[in-house]
Image (spheres, grey):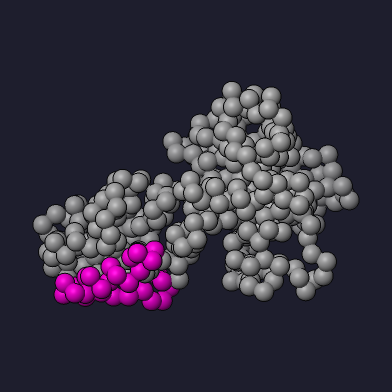
Amino acid sequence: MKSSPMHRAIELARQAQGSTSPNPPVGALVVKDGAVLGEGFTMPPGGDHAEIAALVQAGDSSHGADIYTTLEPCCTQGRTPPCTRAIIAAGIRRVHLAAIDPNPQVSGKGVAELKSAGIEVELPRGQDADTAAELYEAFAKHITTGMPFVVAKFAMSLDGKIATRTGDSKWVTGTEARNLVQQMRKEADAVMVGVNTVLADDPQLTARDPAGSPLPRQPLRVVLDTNCRTPANARMLGEPGHTIIAASSQAPTVKMSQLESAGAEIVTCATGPDGRVDAAELLAELGRRGVVNLLAEGGGTVLGSLIDAHQVDKVFAFIAPVIIGGSQASSPVEGQGVSAMSQALRLGRTRFVQIGDDWLITGYPEAGTSNTV
């Protein structure tokens, strides 16, 4: 079955995910008499927006055509001119939208400008609108609060373990699930782990292609490491991309210098009541740096601290059909936790899908439980 123009526009937007921040990824098509005349997606900051790319490809044939775009066209001057002006100048007769821009400077104003120029506008509806809302959930949070959208990701056994009692964690889930995590990294602006994960697994924390080679664009790597225990020869420091070590100002100066010499950037933060780096302060700093979508990969100390601090917006929980056992085996979420089941973090809008032999549960913390976003 042939996909609709808007479905194709959403596919194009997804191709841009991970390369456009702090701008949102957008896909657009110019269509006339059922034929696609041009298509495009958002380029990295400073490059063309999706609508411009599609209009340029369509050329003079755009006059009298429709344009399908996943997000309301911008009407403000930034690094590039407003897309609304280009749409009006091209003679587009109708604009189909999947989502209204959550940016307060644009929201509804782009539609109003197009309508005032005599262009019909079809507003978001149905499944396309729901898909687009999820596509722009991270951008919506960042543009309105300045904070990253935090996705907590973990993989565990049926009995809730992320490693054996000896710390062996390779691999809890299968190849298909691990490939999906690579896609998540590709789409994220930053990935976050704790120093215990670095010490136990020495991860590379890179986004890689199916052949295992690092992709040209890498997410920012962030390590929560209060006392700078990350080894200067950690594998991630030799990988392409940039690594931030989030530490206390009381961390040993010698350790800081060693890590800086190895290529890491040290970001000092206040510490919370637990004596560890304050998660909210760090997230605010990352937001100022343009991190829109943050993938928190654990381990249990990091995810526990984020949940205790009410800083998780979405959860991806992979469950493998394996039983590990052991009272000393690590669990995916530690931290302080709650004292009563009535306070437990509950997820809403959940989805359940099989990935190879594993299962993935996706959900959002519900308001009124132990985490509110």
Tell me what residue is drawn at x 49 percent, y 49 percent: 288
> Between 189 and 68, which is closer to the camera in this rendering?
189
Q: How many marks?
A: 0
Tell me what residue is drawn at x 74 percent, y 40 percent: 196
Can residue 345 be seen in this snapshot? yes
Q: Is residue 194 magenta?
A: no
Residue 104, image x, y percentages? 38, 66
Tell me what residue is drawn at x 53 percent, y 54 percent: 148
> Between 261 and 89, which is closer to the camera in this rendering?
261
Which image quadrant: the C terminus? Answer: bottom right
Residues in magenta?
Answer: 103-129
Tell me what residue is drawn at x 71 percent, y 67 percent: 370
Q: Is residue 122 above or below residue 198?
A: below
Residue 169, image x, y percentages? 74, 42
Residue 166, image x, y percentages? 83, 39
Residue 326, image x, y percentages? 87, 49
Residue farthest to the right, as pictured: 327
| Side (left or right) of 8 relative to 65 | right
